Image (spheres, rainbow, N blue to C red):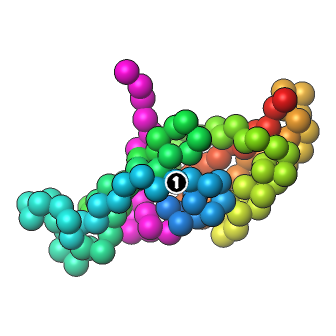
Amino acid sequence: MNVQTYLFFDGCCQQAIDLYKAAIGAELLHLTRFSDAPAALRAPKRDHLVFHATLRIGDTLLNLSDDPMQDKGAFGGFVLLLHLDSPDAVDSAAELLGRGGQIDMAAQEVFWAKRYAIVTDPFGVTWKLQFSD
């Protein structure tokens, strides 16, 4: 048994996938568009959007989709904590994820980690990025 995160986007899921691949080395394992879904599940004029995608980030699977009803609301009440392999990886991920979003806490050493940052990406997902020995 395991628990996986599922993020819903308002028409920008493909852009999120592209960012996560570039910024944190996410590997795309699966992608289905609404055009590939059964007719009953398709959304008018949204066939190009992501019905379901799965990314692998290290040992973790992250699921993503565009919300065809566009009523997902804002992300909130959680963050994604990403353990990285080096201080430079924290700096790079923070810079790339923060483009078009915001740096909530600049990368720095903290008492529990050699390098730590908090960023909210352009899609509203907050990431805590950490490197510890």
Which quadrant of the structure image shows residue 82? Answer: top right
Q: Neighbour class for label 1 at 10 Å: few (<14), some, many (≥20)?
A: some
Q: Is residue 79 above or below residue 121?
A: above
Q: Residue at x 20, y 65 (%)?
A: 36
Q: Which residue lies most toward the left here?
A: 40
Q: Position of residue 14 (x, y in %)?
A: 44, 67
Q: Is residue 110 above or below residue 105?
A: above
Nearer-the-camera pick, 25 or 51? 25
In the picture, which quadrant includes the N terminus?
top left
Tell me if residue 2 is in the magenta stretch.
yes
Tell me if residue 78 is in the magenta stretch.
no
In the picture, which quadrant includes the C terminus?
top right
Which quadrant of the structure image shows residue 112? Answer: top right
Q: Is residue 133 visible?
A: yes
Q: Which residue lies most toward the top here?
A: 1
Q: Is residue 102 visible?
A: no
Q: Position of residue 115 (x, y in %)?
A: 85, 41
Q: Residue at x 22, y 78 (%)?
A: 45
Label 1, secondary structure: give it: strand
Q: Position of residue 40 (x, y in %)?
A: 8, 60
Q: Residue at x 56, y 53 (%)?
A: 26
Q: Please give the residue where the numbered disc 1 appears in the rendered image.
A: 27
Q: How many marks?
A: 1
Q: Is residue 25 left or right of residue 61?
A: right
Three-letter code, disc 1? Glu
Which quadrant of the structure image shows residue 42? Answer: bottom left
Q: Residue at x 11, y 60 (%)?
A: 38
Q: Position of residue 21 (x, y in %)?
A: 57, 60
| Magenta stretch, residue numbers | 1-15
Q: Is residue 2 left or right of residue 124?
A: left
Q: Is residue 38 left or right of residue 56?
A: left
